[in-house]
Amino acid sequence: MKASSTLIGSVQDVSGTSISVALITDTVTGLSFHNGEAYRIGQVGSFVRIPLGYTSLFGLVSQVGAGAAPVREGAPAPESNQWLRVQLVGERGREGRFERGVSQHPTINDAVHIVTEADLRDIYGPGDPVDFVRVGHLASADSIPALVNINKLVTRHSAVVGTTGAGKSTTVAAILTALSKASAYPSSRILLFDVHGEYGQALQSVSTVLRIEPYLDRGELPLRVPYWALSFDELIRLTFGSLSDDHKAVIGDMIAERKRATFDTNPVAGLTRERISADTPIAFSIHQLWFDLHCREYQTVVPDPGAAADVVHPAYVLDPAGAPVQPGDAAQVVPPLYRMVKTTGPAPERVQWGPDPINIRREVAILGSRLRDPQLQFLFNPDEWRPNLTGTVQADLDTLLDRWLGNANPLTILDLSGVPATILNDLVGAVLRIVYDALFWANSLPEGGKERPLLCVLEEAHTYLSKGREGLASETVKRIAKEGRKYGVGMMLVSQRPSEIDTTILSQCGTIFAMRLANDIDRGQVSGAATDNLKGLFDMLPVLRTGEAIIVGEAVSLPIRAMIDSTSRERRPNSADPTVVVRGDAQGDGYEQEGGWTIPPITENYAIVLRQWRSQTSRYAFVEGDGPIQEG
């Protein structure tokens, strides 16, 4: 008989934090009974306890069988497969408090015990309930909550990764709902970058949604990003596309001078004219800048009328009165029209280009096209933040920051589903940089990140943070990953392809929620980014259930295999797979339904499809004459 009902074996080999355990013969059935409860022995991902006086070491089973036996040079292969490989992860001292890391190592023949449910309660116990937030329950014990430390989760960065259909979006929704609980965290502040518009409906009770074309009946607000709040480099990428260094210098000087002119008309507290540069967030009219550049590039000159008619190289002056044939309109982005250039014939008939072009006609044309693009009006025509032609605005950036960060709800969702894919990378980077700079310089104020930390959640992060892809988003996220902790700005990356995310960024995530991942490259990326030596645990990722996650890192005392709390059907993100064949309560949530290919054919009206496509909205609004339609 065993000396203890929890005893399962003894330590036979120690190598750093990895130990080999020989199981006693009584465990051959794979079961151990303690206080009427049956415990499975040798489950990968389960825990063991090694008592050392007043201290108990805890380890995670990473390998089972003969392969877990210690390897000795020249020794024969082990005859028994009764071996465990265990990774040490933490210890519990005399005070009964669990801590990560170990202060001592076990020795040969030290006893190894199963971890009982009572031990798990001590390890995963709530501690100070304010410091921990529940995200689910242990997969092996429904009665024990899966708790994460909110301080470490927010400021030390995190990542939620999992393949499509693993429950990733629902997990994010559950985490954000828990962090937005007004009774526990009345001043929580979260900014969610929602690339596909999945979360607005699911989190409407705790969020304010900003969308380019808002649904006003849902209380949504228009998403506006004033171009003049961007840095000079950010603005160049979103307007001209690219410029040579010489041209950037000229444009930079022109923008800085216009911002100084705005300051002269509307002085700003705490700023002097001499300190204003092209990067200073002061309004100026980009429409007037485009107009002036167009004139500079296309303006024409004619020979001096006082010169003799037969002069070969006459002096040139501006076209009569310097006026174009058609004046154009800066506010409406209508270019002026000048006379056609004519370089032949007698001097009085010649017309040549103006005296001071900088040869950026192509770039000026690109800028004009973007100013006219209706999809970019949220950037270049941002309502009350649009400057008039002299640079005067109705509202300053304090009202913009208040809309993004200071509204009544703890969660602000920036719905980017209407943003053109060509500028998504740069736009995400620009918004992040605006927010980070504002909180960086306000770190000593009540609105700053140190007094009221901010969590930025980046959905579909692999689309704009991929390896080798340089862009504003990558640059800004790297800065936040390295410096954000000091200024109260944390981030949570959400991705189905962690292998595509820049390793510098992923390695800074202190906590990882790893859901089902079938791809070996993705698993390797997650395993390499984790702070614990837990390769055996991550080998379980392909077989995790939907909604199940392995949580490792700084926000948890020990790695947790947890079932994330489910949400009601109406609180789930709009990311579920379409129904092909469904009858009855297929999802087990109490909703009887039929759908997909099982319902009778209906009279379809593709004119409505065309209208929705052209208007770039997926929300249906009935218009008389549409004909029959199934609401849903």
Image: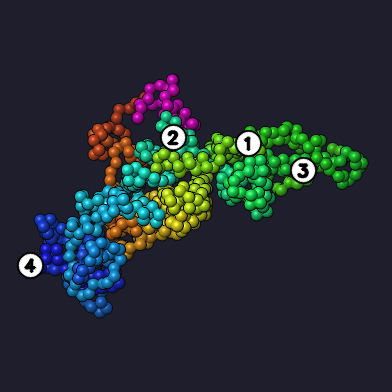
Residue, disc 3: 353
Q: Nearer the viewer, mark 3 or mark 1?
A: 1
Numbered badge on residue 1: 4
Seen at 25% across and 77% down, the residue is: 72
Q: Nearer the viewer, residue 386 or 357?
A: 386
Q: Position of residue 188 (x, y in %)?
A: 39, 46
Q: Residue at x 18, y 74 (%)?
A: 109
The scheme the figure's colours follow is rainbow
Q: Is label 2 in a helix, a strand or a loop?
A: loop
Q: Is residue 25 above or below residue 273?
A: below
Q: Main secondary structure of the magenta part?
A: loop
Image side of residue 467 versus residue 515, left or right: right
- Location of the N terminus by quadrant is bottom left
Amino acid type, mark 2: Glu
* x 73%, y 32%: residue: 326
Q: CB of mark 3 within 8 Å of CB of mark 2?
A: no
Circle nearer the N terminus (1, 2): 2
Looking at the image, how many numbered discs can be counted on the residues? 4
Q: In front of the other: label 3 or label 4?
A: 4
What's under tag 4, amino acid-wise?
Answer: Met
Kindly state the secondary structure of the residue where label 3 is placed: strand
